[in-house]
Each structure stands twice: as structure tokens, then as C-alpha cells.
Amino acid sequence: MKILKSLLILAACAAMAGCATKRSISNSAYRDPPRDPRRAPVESSDPGFEYRGELSEFDVLGVVRDQAPFDEDIQQALDKARPIRLKPASTILLIQSGAMFPDGPMVVELSKHFSVVPFSGLPPRTGAMDGLETRDSAGFSRSLRLAAARAGAETILCYWGILESAREKMATKTVSWVPVLTWFVPDEREHVRIRLKLALIDVRSGSWSVLSPPPFDSATLRVGKRRAVADQKLVERLKDRAYEASARELMKSYAAAELSSKFTNE
């Protein structure tokens, strides 16, 4: 019986060590291993701040998927399209999809060059038709543009981010077993990659552009009960690097000529 139990534990650890997970940067808390289902989790957060999903990219950009446009509509859109430009010291409405507030490091990076107005990125609550896209995408986008206009912002910057992680057992190290509740887990190495996507919307015209900087990845050792702490430190470091690089890429691609040349020469 003891041998069978040990084999089950080893199989569970092997499955944990080789798994890969994805999580939003707006919901990046460490996920504990499976717990005893009989033990109810402790709820301590305000329900109003709980993560409830991401903003739809179609809603933010005002793209109506169930509408059949005519060739004339496409031609008019091309005629009216203007390149997105960021003016030094201008005001930006900043939105992090899925979060009540944008992450501090992103605000800090952009505030070096612009006046940043943080705005909620929580998606609208849905009713009985939950899961079905019943919202007016164009109307939602215009509401965001109106909110930005009232704040004196000429541009909306909305960004999405995903953290991809994979765990593997260390092949060159003797396994040391550390008790966690009724589980035993080996030393692990966690590989984490962060990917961001940024959308810029011109408040006046509704023209938009999307930027996806190169991903950042890293790895750290995680041992025993402190693996949650190590995970969160790694996530924060990756976010800092990604936000700094994204701000620089944003300036080089969309800033006014004098500001763009400054970043190119650095």
C-alpha cells in the first residue's frame, strides 16, 4: 500500500513538473498545487476588484464582426485613415485589459514622456447571455473615445499581456523532497515568458494601430514553500523589462520626429 501511494505521489509530481500554464498579466498571482477539495478557500478580496476576464480587442477598436461592409465603406476608411502620432507631453488614456488600474511600472515609463490618465480595463458585466458577444462594439469604442476626450486625451493606449510558464525537473540535481500539505514536490526550474500587445487609438478619428513587441523570457529556481515568492518576483522582473522595452518601442514607432530620433540614438 505504501509503495502504491509513493508511486501515485511521484506520478503527480511528474505531471506537475512538466506542465505549462498561461495567465493574464492582470491575473498573475501564483497558482498553488491542487488542494484538498474539502477545504474551502479563504476569500479576502473585494468582489468589485476580482478578475473577470479581458477586454475584447474588437470592442476596444470598434470592429463589428457580424457586419458585412461594402467596398465603398472600405474605400472611405482608407481615405480617412491617418497615421498614429504621439506628441511629447500630450495626454494618454491608459488601459490595462482586465485590471482596475494599469500596472505601476507601465505608468512610470510612459509618464516620462506623457501625461498619463489611468482608466479601468475591467470588461463590462454580462447578464443571461454570458459568453455571447451581444455588445455594440462600435458603441463601446466610441464610449472610450468620449471618456478620453473629456479627460483631454488625444490618444488611448490599451494593452494586453500574457504570461506563459513551464516547469521542469532539474536533470542535473538530486531531488530534494519538501512537504507541502499532503504533497511532496521536487526542486523545479520555472521558465516564464511575457508577451504584450498594445493598441493605440486616435480619439478624434478612431484610427488605430497595434504593436506587439518581442517577448521576454527568463528562468528561476523554485524550492519548497518559497516557490510562490520566487514566482512573483520573477513575474515582476519580467513585467518591468517588458514595460520598459514596450515604452521605448512605442516611442520609436509612433512618437513625433524629434522624440523618436532621441530614442533611436540612445
Image (cartoon, rainbow, N blue to C red):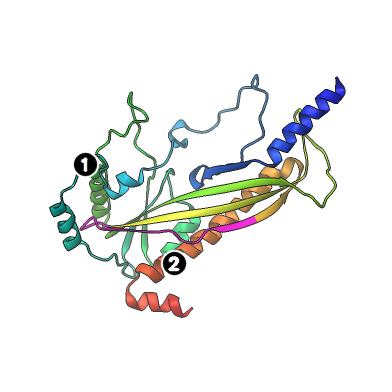
Q: Which residue is mark 2?
A: 249
Vertical position of residue 262 compared to residue 40: above or below = below
What's the residue at 29%, 64% (across, down)?
84
Q: Which residue is located at x 67 percent, y 27 percent?
A: 35
Range drawn in magenta: 202-218
* Residue found farthest to the front: 71
Q: Position of residue 175 (x, y in %)?
A: 83, 44
Q: Give the residue furthest to the left.
A: 72
Q: Earlier in the sequence, mark 2 or mark 1?
A: 1
Q: CA distance from mark 2 to mark 1?
A: 34 Å
Membership of 211 in magenta stretch: yes
Q: What is the three-letter code of the residue carrying label 2?
A: Glu
Residue that badge 1 annotates: 67
Label 2 environment density (alpha carbons within 10 Å; few <14, some 14–19, many ≥20): some
From the viewer's perspective, is residue 21 above or below residue 109? above
Q: Position of residue 126 (x, y in %)?
A: 34, 30
Q: Position of residue 50 (x, y in %)?
A: 47, 35
Left or right: 195 in relation to 252: right
